[in-house]
Amino acid sequence: MANGHPSFLALLFPPPALGSYRTLKMESDEPDGHSLSRRVEWCDVTPLPQDDGPNPVVPIAYKEEFRETMDYFRAIYQADERSPRAFRLTRQAIVANPGNYTVWHFRRLLLQTLNVDLYEELDFLQQIANSNSKNYQLWHHRRWVVERLGIDARAKELQLTKKILSLDAKNYHAWSHRQWVLQALGGWEDELDYCQQLLEEDIFNNSAWNQRYFVITRSPFLGGLKAMRESEVRYTVEAILAKPENESPWRYLRGLYKDNIEVWVNDPQISLVCLKVMNAKSNYVFALSMLLDLLCHGFQPSEEFRDAVDALWTSDNHPLDSDLAKAVCCILEHVDSLRASYWRWRKSKLPLAA
Amino acid sequence: MESFPSLTVTQRDQILVEQQVFNIYKAFYDMPPSSQSLMLELQRENHVEYLTNGLKHLGPSFCVLDANRPWLCYWIIHSIALMDEFLDPELEDNTIDFLSRCQDPNGGYGGGPGQMPHVATTYAAVNSLVTLGGDKALCSINREKLYTFLRRMKDPNGAFRMHDDGEIDVRACYTAISVASLLNILDDDLVQDVGNYILSCQTYEGGIAGEPGSEAHGGICQFVACGIASIQYEKASTSSDNLFIRYTFCGLATMILINEVDRLDLSSLIDWVVFRQGVEAGFQGRTNKLVDGCYSFWQGGVFALLKRLQSTKGEQSVPMGDGEDSGAGSPQTTASSDATGAEGLNEDSSQAGSHFEQGEPHDASCPVVVENIDHNSSKRRAKVEPLFNCLALQQYILLCAQEPGGGLRDKPGKSRDHYHTCYCLSGLSVCQHSWSEDEDSPPLPSAILGSYSNLLEPIHPLYNVVLDRYQEAHEFFSRS
Ligand SMILES: [Zn+2]
């Protein structure tokens, strides 16, 4: 990067250097240095070149090795050859390009036909994931394998995703996989603690908040949103008061009442957290935004709210609107000027004052 | 890193990016006006050259995109069309020929010749051909077979899978429905239950996730989100992914295309997406994540969709009350002057803002959109005020995402690539046209950051193809 700061993620996830690429290749059972065409095993197969036409667009200057691997792959794919050598070839093709979904698909057919040990397949996937954990095919394939292994694979999957998330706490694929494992195979018992731990490390980690929501709404052990609400609200309010500029807990707090907006409007804890943040007079955009939503849904504010809002209005050009919701919009338009047009629009949508 | 001991990873990452972006802005504001206007210039010639070169030749590092070649075609051809440039006829013919080789005999397009048909690469191929336009390109699409392919990809739960035995998610739903709509083969069988699936993906935050339960997301930017980034794509890359599409945009566009948008909680979706624009002026994909140029379209495009909804349905139609007011309103039928399509929107507004102004008939020829109710400016004619800050976004795209030598990127410090070039430019077009009162009138100079020559062609936001190319295709496929 320009000023010498490498991106933090880039440090955690260095581009898979040639090293890891080689490691994978050596592990494939290709005797080094011998191209497929010179190996007895493949002498009966005629490689099938890509039908690119005379003047292809977006033509890729394939490395010779890549071209050869794919030519052989096309040949066995077309012949639908379900053999061990075909299986080994898919490994080579996946290493060369993990984004080739056709190869992955054919590999699944081979896994079925050849009765391969699926735990070995998980190890192979782990190697691919080490160099690229953000690939749809990889995770889709893994799900397919785990589906077949069933509950025995559970611990390994939870462990693997945990490991990936320890390096990149917002890896979307890893989170999706973890959620799928929980739903398909269980393992919910420690999940809330896990979210808690991740949030202690980084309270701004929105993926961890999302996972927390997933757990409290879906875990069979926790009794659902309604049962969890009280304790979750306490936790979230605390997180907000510690860092009112953190958008994640504000959205989470609102989510805790998704099933019942009326309870949200009338729960004094909600309006109180808005009031406290406004009274502290810094980082109050989300507090005002939530107050506005409350007002739109019929919240009846006491004088304290009016006073708190008035205290945030520093401009002496004109007095603040007497309607509290309008006043909130005016302040937001002013202090959150990037979104000024949004707040103007919100103001225009307010129900007529009673 | 040691310099921020008390900060979390999220805060540290954010600060590093902010510093880089603010340095650029600071340098810009310290410049004399003449240098400023140079900085704000869209380097058309260089972009076109970078793109055209890619169409003609790609280096060995592109092996990892070998299953995404129709995507490369689309990113390049669409970008060139946005700049109102044309390919030379030979290159155009070569593209049509190449894409025909990617077309499966049983329908749909694969990532390259001989690869399995894939819904997302089908979308990329069809959008490329529509963008090229002309009978030859449009006739090359086997619509009957494509329809059977899409039917085959439809899961019993209503959603679509990407390919035989492939993954099911919101992107697959969007690309399938978009292609079917564009080719005029969308029917009840394809639509059946897809809305239920999308609905189950809207999260408590308001945005839309890839699968039920996941985090609200503009989507996954492969090149960026992993930090492996475009540098790798340009050089020795082993990372790839065959999907470059974003969930919230996809979910919303799908719901509009199937005429079920009112089932979404639009007020929370809007609130979520306006907050994705950050201090850097660009958009982030998820709450508390980093800014990235490609979200200029994936999030900015959401506003273009909303604007379209409003101008079609009438100004008060986006309910701000979580849908609890979705009782039967009076059906409003707009005049049929929505020449640019989005059929179905016209008739469906039964749930529109019922507690505001009850179903006034709207003349679609004067679409009052998000009207400016600021008292100071209400004397001026009603104007289309976008809900996001489109001048700020243009600033991010031109100053932070643009590489003067050609091509656009995620953020300062990353390298250009075709994907980001496509979506930064698409986002730029959205910004420039977001004040326009209707699609046919050119934007006012005040809507364009930098010189008016930066102006790009308008797009059709549901499909992200250049508007007049869409119109040609729409006409072509409604005839046949
Ligand atoms: Zn990106």
Image (cartoon, rainbow, N blue to C red):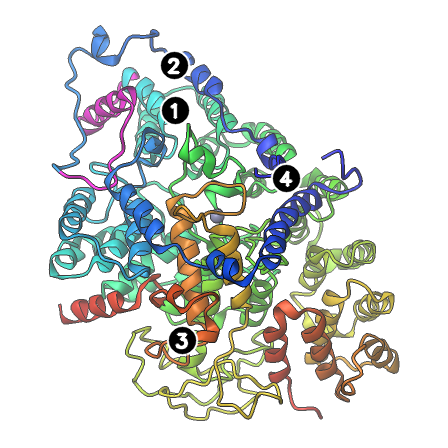
Q: Quadrant of residue A326?
A: bottom right
Locate residue A127 relative to residue A256 in the image: left or right: left
Q: Which residues are magenta?
A: A55-84
Disc 1 sits on a residue from what chain? A
Vertical arrangement, residue A330 with respect to residue A105, above or below: below
Residue A95 badge: 1
- Residues tagged 3 and 1 counted as in contact (Cβ below 8 A): no
N-terminal-most mark, 1 or 4: 1
Q: Quadrant of the N terminus of chain A?
A: top right
Disc 2 sits on a residue from what chain? A
N-terminal-most mark, 2 or 4: 2
x%, y% of residue B98?
A: 18, 43
- Residues tagged 2 and 3 counted as in contact (Cβ below 8 A): no
Residue position for label 4: A169
Question: What kind of residue is marked 4?
Answer: Ala
**Which label lies toward us, 2 or 3?**
3
Residue for point 60% across, 74% down: A342
| The residue carrying mark 2 has its beta carbon less than 8 Å from ligand 1 | no
Q: Secondary structure at mark 4?
A: loop
Residue for point 25% across, 13% down: A36
Q: Quadrant of residue B356?
A: bottom right
x%, y% of residue B113?
A: 20, 38
Question: What kind of residue is marked 3?
Answer: Pro
- Residues tagged 3 and 4 counted as in contact (Cβ below 8 A): no
Vertical arrangement, residue B81 with respect to residue A263, above or below: above
Q: Is circle 2 on the same chain as circle 4?
A: yes
Q: Quadrant of residue A329?
A: bottom right
Disc 2/disc 1 C-alpha distance (Å): 9 Å
Categorize mark 3 by other alpha carbons within 10 Å: few (<14), some (14-19), many (20+): some
- Residues tagged 2 and 4 counted as in contact (Cβ below 8 A): no
User: Does the magenta portion include A341?
Assistant: no
Residue A28 badge: 2
